[in-house]
Image (cartoon, rainbow, N blue to C red):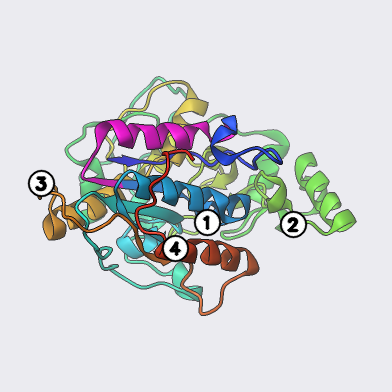
Amino acid sequence: HIGGPPCQGFSTAGMRFWDDPRNGLLKHYVNALAILRPKWFIMENVEGLLTAKGGIYVYEAARAFIKLGYSIRIDKIYAQEYGIPQRRKRTLVIGNRLGMEFNLPEPLVHVHGRIFKNADVTLRHTIGELPNPTLDKSCPVSYNGKSKHEWEEQLRDGNKKLYDHFTPKIEGVQLDRIKNLKPGQSMKDLPESLHHESFKRRAYRRVMDGMPPERRGGAPSGIKRLIFDEPSLTITGAAVREFIHPKYNRPLTLRECARIQTFPDWFRFQGNTSEKIKQIGNAIPPLLAEIFAVHLQVNYGFRETTHSSPSRLFAHTLTKATAMSPALTKTDNMLQGLYKRKNPQLSLFG
């Protein structure tokens, strides 16, 4: 079972965690595990899950999984290390009802610092061979001949026509902004006369109170032109508005975002443009999910009988760095307490 219930912001002061309606999606996920009783589950979420609500979110989630009889581990992983063509950091909670300790799949590469910019699979490999997009969102596009790269071949996967490979007409000041962006540059690198009003407001508020704009929500960089020979930045629900093609003066298309997320070209998304990019950005990259699922199946199995070992938290990795931030340290201290509390006999949401 693979899923990713969103973290819904901060709890109301004084309200018990599981009584807060904003934690309902996590509660539904826990209830789904209680009903389906899969031998294994993988819960994926944003990196910020590790510090959300002062660490309470991931702590309470871990307690609930343990009460359901799962042995779990919690890890921050870097999707780029597994061949995903984007710098995507995510939190994984993986558990089994077999009473087994287990390891994560070995990364294909180890990334840190500037090495994050290097990859075997880059944006050029991923979207460089795509034909020009159409202006008509209902019109499919034909490929430009045979694929020249193994990764391109894998993404096509026998498909004949490209859907969702369209772009809106770009003109006026929006086009001026995009034309003035070099690869790797963002709104802050443009002349002030081209700054978007929302970007100006965020910049002004930071000057006034010192709070970084990313703490307020929304993209701190506005628009940003990507770099062909590097992995993409993280694909989110805002990617088709904010990420500019490395070569052409337009935002990424839905299909380009889907490819960066490793969706094969035959996969069709449902709904309007806003709903489709949300489906793409919120998804676990299919290739990443496959790598982890196959690893667990091959090395640990899905059908073995449950062992008698107590359910527990047996490992967690919150960062690759040698030192932790105060926020991560707080979460780490909370999780350390779970190692001393094996299989707590409490009600599920107690």
User: Which dot, 3 or 4, sits closer to the camera?
Assistant: 3
User: Which dot, 2 or 1, sits closer to the camera?
Assistant: 1
Amino acid on which disc 1 is placed: Leu
Secondary structure mostly taken by the magenta-highlighted segment of the chain: helix
How far apart are the two marked residues, 3 and 1, measured between alpha carbons?
Answer: 31 Å
Of the numbered discs 2 and 1, the one sitting upstream in the chain is 1
* Residue 158 on image: x %, y %: 16, 38
Report which residue position mark 1 lands on. Answer: 50
Q: Is residue 193 magenta?
A: no
How far apart are the two marked residues, 1 and 4, measured between alpha carbons?
Answer: 27 Å
User: Which dot, 4 or 2, sits closer to the camera?
Assistant: 2
In the image, residue 270 above or below residue 224? above
Chain part drawn in magenta: 22-41
| Residue at the spot 68% in from the left edge and 52% down from the top edge | 214
Position of 88 compared to 2: left or right? right
For disc 3, the neighbor class at 10 Å (few under 14, some 14 to 19, many from 20) is: few
Position of 83 compared to 168: left or right? left
Of the numbered discs 4 and 2, the one sitting upstream in the chain is 2
Label drawn at residue 230: 4
| Residue at the spot 51% in from the left edge and 31% down from the top edge | 24
Of the numbered discs 1 and 4, the one sitting upstream in the chain is 1
Position of 76 compared to 168: left or right? left
In the image, residue 342 above or below residue 11? below
The quadrant of the picture occupied by the N terminus is top left
* Residue 49 on image: x %, y %: 52, 51
Of the numbered discs 3 and 1, the one sitting upstream in the chain is 1
Label drawn at residue 212: 2
| Residue at the spot 55% in from the left edge and 46% down from the top edge | 243
Q: Classify mark 2: helix, strand or loop.
A: loop
In the image, residue 124 above or below residue 219? below
